[in-house]
Amino acid sequence: MSNPTVPPSTSVTSATSTVQGALTAIDAELHRTVSSLLGADPAPFAGAFDRLRTADRVFVSGAGRSGLALRMTAMRLMHLGLTVHVVGETTTPAISSGDVLLVASGSGTTTGVVRAADTAVSVGAEVVAITTDPASPLAELAAETIVVPAAQKTDHGGTRSVQYSGSLFEQAVMLLGDAFFHALWQSDGVSAEELWPRHANLE
């Protein structure tokens, strides 16, 4: 007698094949995107690196999944010993001159993110932006802009990505955050053991 809770092996194989096919497509898009970033003008990367390295404090701001990706970056920068705040948290202080605001918006027009960047600039802080549109309001406010060749979340035509909405951009934001952390970590010369005590111990 068959167990109704266990799907037929053909269904398992089909589902696995579909997921693996999706992974293949995502892998190809990420490879293409990273290759494009590697071939881009290195100046914005170097400028963003220097600003993050010398900032008094780093603030991160992004909406939706882009914001979640930047939260991961904030955690890693904290592990490195930087003073980091996530915009919108109740304990986040006022930004001021000497600080850096790291922001991400695929369209570069996300209202809350652009408003945060405008406020940062008005008080003398610097903005590092990750976006798909170098001519966007966000890019115009930024001291350094890293342009990701990915679809915006409203681009449903599939011309730049087969993935849904802004998935490719959000994945790129996460990778860029890890790349900034890794470069800063390597330049700092500290060991992983020295970073480890900063990991949360109230989980």
Image (cartoon, helix red, strand yellow):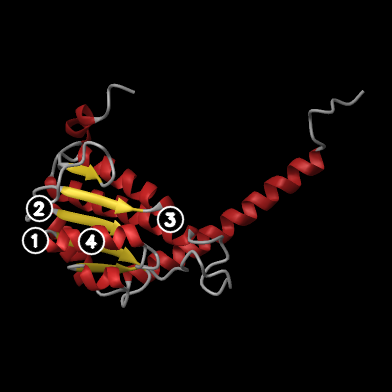
Asked whether the beta carbons under mark 4 and mark 1 sit within 8 Å of each other, the answer is: no
Asked whether the beta carbons under mark 2 and mark 4 sit within 8 Å of each other, the answer is: no
- Which residue, given by chain and number where applicable, does mark 2 sit on? 96
User: In the figure, residue 170 lies in which quadrant?
Assistant: bottom left
Quarter of the image where the N terminus is located = top right
- Which residue, given by chain and number where applicable, does mark 1 sit on? 124
Q: Is residue 76 left or right of residue 66?
A: left
- Which residue, given by chain and number where applicable, does mark 4 sit on? 117
- Looking at marks 3 and 4 on the same chain, the residue that comes earlier in the sequence is marked by 4
In this rendering, is residue 66 above or below 135?
A: above
Q: Badge 3: how crowded within 10 Å, few (<14), some, or many (20+)? A: some
Q: Is residue 192 left or right of residue 4?
A: left
Q: For mark 4, give the secondary structure.
A: helix
Residue at screen point 82% across, 37% down: 8
Query: Which numbered dot is residue 191?
Result: none
Q: Which x, y percent locates residue 5?
A: 79, 28
The amino acid type, in three-letter code, at marker 4 is Ala
Q: Badge 1: how crowded within 10 Å, few (<14), some, or many (20+)? A: some
Asked whether the beta carbons under mark 1 and mark 2 sit within 8 Å of each other, the answer is: yes
The amino acid type, in three-letter code, at marker 3 is Gln
Quarter of the image where the C terminus is located = top left
Q: Badge 2: how crowded within 10 Å, few (<14), some, or many (20+)? A: some
Label 2 vs label 3: CA separation?
30 Å
Q: Which x, y percent locates residue 172?
A: 39, 59
The amino acid type, in three-letter code, at marker 2 is Ser
- Which residue, given by chain and number where applicable, does mark 3 sit on? 171
Label 1 vs label 3: CA separation?
30 Å
Q: Badge 4: how crowded within 10 Å, few (<14), some, or many (20+)? A: many
